[in-house]
Image (cartoon, rainbow, N blue to C red):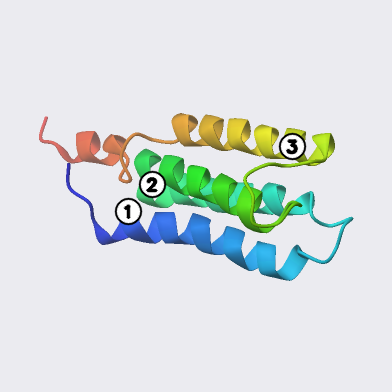
Amino acid sequence: MRFTFKFWMGIALCAGTSVVLCVLLRDGEDFRLVAPAISLLAVILTSVWSGRRSALIGSIMATFTYEFLLFPPIGSLVIDDPTERMMLIAFQCFALLAAFLSPRNSRPRVMEKSRSPR
């Protein structure tokens, strides 16, 4: 298994987006539930740009980041509010679904087949 620059940048995009959203939305009680939905876009971009593995790892890292830094009690992996817990479970399910529906490789194979001599 070869890890490329795109692989690590995809993971950094997912994790970095979640950390930035945690810092920006920590005080807004009404806006906290929006952070995983915004981060889902980063997971989709990562899965298309750098592949399935980096999207899977990035979504798991984003989930732990939200559990630890965004939802109260801060600094714990336990979430008190059932609404916030369900939002995070929904984020993880949709992120995994998006990662599995992405192309297997970062480069589509359709172009490779069309370039082969007939």
Within 10 angstroms of label 3, few (less than 14), some, or many (20 or more) residues?
A: some
Q: Name the residue rendered at 67%, 63% in the picture.
A: 21
Q: Is residue 11 left or right of residue 96?
A: left
Task: In the rendered view, tell whether residue 111 sits above or below residue 65.
Answer: above
* Residue 81: quadrant of the picture: top right
Numbered label attached to residue 85: 3
Residue 3 screen position, x and y as percent:
22, 51
Q: Which label sits in the foreground, 3 or 1?
A: 3
Query: Of residues 16 and 64, which is closer to you in this image?
Result: 64
Nearer to us: label 3 or label 2: 3
Q: Are marks 1 and 2 in contact (CB under 8 Å)?
A: yes
Quarter of the picture holding the C terminus: top left
C-alpha gap between disc 3 and disc 2 = 24 Å
Residue with the mark numbered 1: 7
Looking at the image, residue 31 lies above or below residue 115 = below
The relative height of residue 46 versus residue 85 in the rendered view (above or below) is below
Q: Please, what secondary structure does the residue beneath circle 3 have?
A: helix
Residue name at image x 62 percent, y 67 percent: 20
Label 3 or label 1, whichever comes before in sequence order? 1
| Image quadrant in which you'd find residue 108 | top left
Looking at the rendered structure, which numbered label has been put on residue 54?
A: 2
- SS type, badge 2: helix
User: x, y percentage for residue 35?
Assistant: 71, 54
